[in-house]
Image: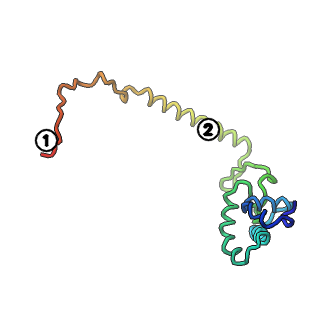
Amino acid sequence: MKLSKMPKEELEQYSYDELTKMILEESKKPLNTAEIFKTICDLLGYSETEYSDKIGDYYTSLTTDKDFVLLEDGTWDLRDHHPATVSLEDDDETYGEDDLEDIEEAAEEMDEIIADREDDLDDDDDVDMDLDDLEDDDDLTIIDEEELED
């Protein structure tokens, strides 16, 4: 059912994020923040003041929801419509698939070095203390609280 045909009472049960998904699916094209939120406000019968008061929070909710992606032209679309790509860029230098393999190998080597060092720490005999090595407790004395106050 089209959003415009749905009763207001039913629309009010949906969150802004759910309404945004429905709007983007219906439009079949990316839309900017103002267009989407204006549509939501029209559907819910919000005034211009409510639109102005709530658009900042709405934008924040879009940026934190993983279902939406902000495109380079400033429009929003559903993440499902855009395949995930990996781009490693540094100082205008783009790294290819071979470079990515080198980075992964370096990360694995670093993990091995860290694991070896952790093993060395675990095996360190100087750190371990055996209770049998402690002196007898014959020299220990119990002190009353009153003696501590003096």
What amino acid type is highlighted by mark number 1? Glu
Circle on res. 147: 1
- Could you say where residue 79 lies in the image, as x and y percent from the top left? 77, 54
What amino acid type is highlighted by mark number 2? Ala
| Dot 1 crowding, Cα within 10 Å, few <14, some 14–19, many 20+ | few
Q: Is residue 39 left or right of residue 113?
A: right
- Could you say where residue 102 lies in the image, as x and y percent from the top left? 67, 39
Measuring 76% from the left and 49% from the top, which residue is drawn there?
Answer: 84
Measuring 31% from the left and 24% from the top, which residue is drawn there?
Answer: 131
| Dot 2 crowding, Cα within 10 Å, few <14, some 14–19, many 20+ | few
Circle on res. 127: none
Q: Are marks 2 and 1 in contact (CB under 8 Å)?
A: no
Residue placed most toward the observer, 103 or 55: 55
Residue 64 drawn above or below residue 8: above
Measuring 66% from the left and 58% from the top, which residue is drawn there?
Answer: 64
Residue pointed to by mark 2: 106
Judge depth for marks 2 and 1 and give the one in front: 1
Which residue is situated farthest in the top direction here? 132
Residue placed most toward the observer, 64 or 141: 141
- Could you say where residue 17 lies in the image, as x and y percent from the top left? 73, 60
SS of the residue under disc 2: helix
**Placement of the N terminus among the 4 image quadrants:** bottom right
SS of the residue under disc 1: helix
